Image (cartoon, rainbow, N blue to C red):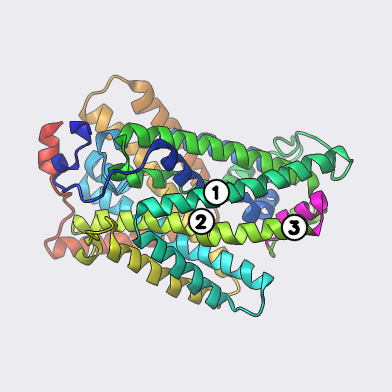
Amino acid sequence: MQPQENVEQFGYRQELRRRIGLTDLVFYGLIFMVPIAPFAIFGHVYSISKGMPALTYAIGMVALLFTASSYTQMVKAFPLSGSVYNYAGRGIAAPVGFMTGWAVLLDYILAPGLLYLVASIAMNASIPAIPVGVWLVFFVVVNTVINLRGIRMTISLTKALITIELIVLGLFLAAGFWALLQGKGHGFSFAPLFNPDTFSWPVVFGAVSVAVLSFLGFDGISMLVEEAKGGSAQVGRAMRLALILAGALFIVQVWVAALLVPDPAGLLAHGDPGGTAFFDTAEVAGGSWLAHVTSTATAVSWGLADTMVAQVAVSRLLYAMARDRQLPSFLAKVSVKHSVPTNATLFVATLSIVLGLWMSTREDGVDLLSSLINMGALIAFIVLHVSVITHYVIRRKSTDFLRHLVVPLIGMAILIFVVINANILAQRVGLIWLAVGAVVLLVLYAMGRRPTPSGFAAAEEHR
């Protein structure tokens, strides 16, 4: 391990073991994003993008590649768990780091609850005899037991699950292409990528604000920098690879699905309140068996695979903030035997059960959680770009203007446009969440626990 990758210089002990390779990191990012993620939200994206889901996902991928570039620069400067919390706190100022960590918590803490809820509803639809709440508790318990056993077990199981997802996706694409060749659907066209009759930037970026949900998770790779064998360089490569691979898979599958939508006019006019639009296209492509396979795969991927890695990511963020005394210290406890943040993992599991059961009683539970999640991540990504400019250009007087100024500015501009065109409810909740974070920050100051990352002064001297 290279000296600059040693966390001791930042005032911490190396408590997490470096066991994860490049392939493992890419798999982790892919499983977090879920290769078949568009299955669950295809109808909504198709509707609000006016029939251009492929363009929506393409823009989302490009936008987040700029964000991945900024992640690469900041993880190189601060190879620590905690992701944007550490990057903003050390790259700009400690209070900004707290607020950024608070913003991304909105995404990370709520995401497992949403994933468990969607999967439980899907499984209840397949097996009505078992209530949604029972499925939800089952998924949470299974994932928590696996994650408490250590990161290697989590990575091994996610590899198996992602293989199954890719097989299901392959079946859909093969059946879809064959169906198009047989004259089913609407024939091949570029309309899903660009339709001049319905195109407008506000429409597309409004759709991107929803589609970005499928990409959230690539940033979770940075949470594992203290456990990566190759440190920050390996994490940066893994983030780019995972984004490109996932983006390509997303674009192809929604393009094919868009060409097979049985009632395009109805979907555009009324949306997809039941969340079955993709499964309807699968039935057109291969029959009822394919619709059943794709719906079951969606439930399992969201309920086990994606939630498993989501729980890992949020537990690392809680661990990082707790060891800096910005959250209760019990969340910083690490298992000596398995080298995982035990209490943070159990806390996420408990919160997911409570949140999931509560939202399962609301008719708008899934839509409400979905609206809340994206905004926190988008705000954190914007601050990430600011961190790169502040740390490298302003503080270190970097002359690498492409990576340290131009790329962050472009990435920031795209994300700001996405936020402006996002759902109004999501915008309001994001502002309310930030206001609550500001109150918490003031309380910390009043208690004499002002945000100051451990070893901050020593790290500054080192650089």
Q: Which residue is mark 1?
A: 162
Instruction: Give the farthest residue toward the right.
Output: 183
Residue corresponding to mark 2? 305
Residue 53 spot, x, y in % from top left: 67, 43
Residue designated by label 3: 291
Q: Nearer the viewer, residue 151 or 132?
A: 151
Give the alpha-carbon distance from disc 3 to disc 1, as whole Å.
Answer: 19 Å
Looking at the image, do the residues carrying marks 1 and 2 touch, with CB atoms under 8 Å apart?
yes
Going by the image, does 433 lie left or right of 242? left
Real-space Cα distance between discs 1 and 2? 8 Å
Q: In this view of the protein, which residue sits in the foreground, 352 or 337?
A: 337
Nearer mark to the viewer, of 3 and 1: 1
Residue 36 seen in this snapshot: no
Q: Residue at x 53, y 57 (%)?
A: 424
Q: Earlier in the sequence, mark 3 or mark 1?
A: 1
Mark 3 neighbour density, 10 Å: few (under 14) some (14–19) many (20 or more): many
Type of amino acid under label 3:
Ala
Q: Please tell me whether mark 1 sits on a helix, a strand or a loop.
A: helix
Q: Which stretch did the figure color magenta? A: 275-288
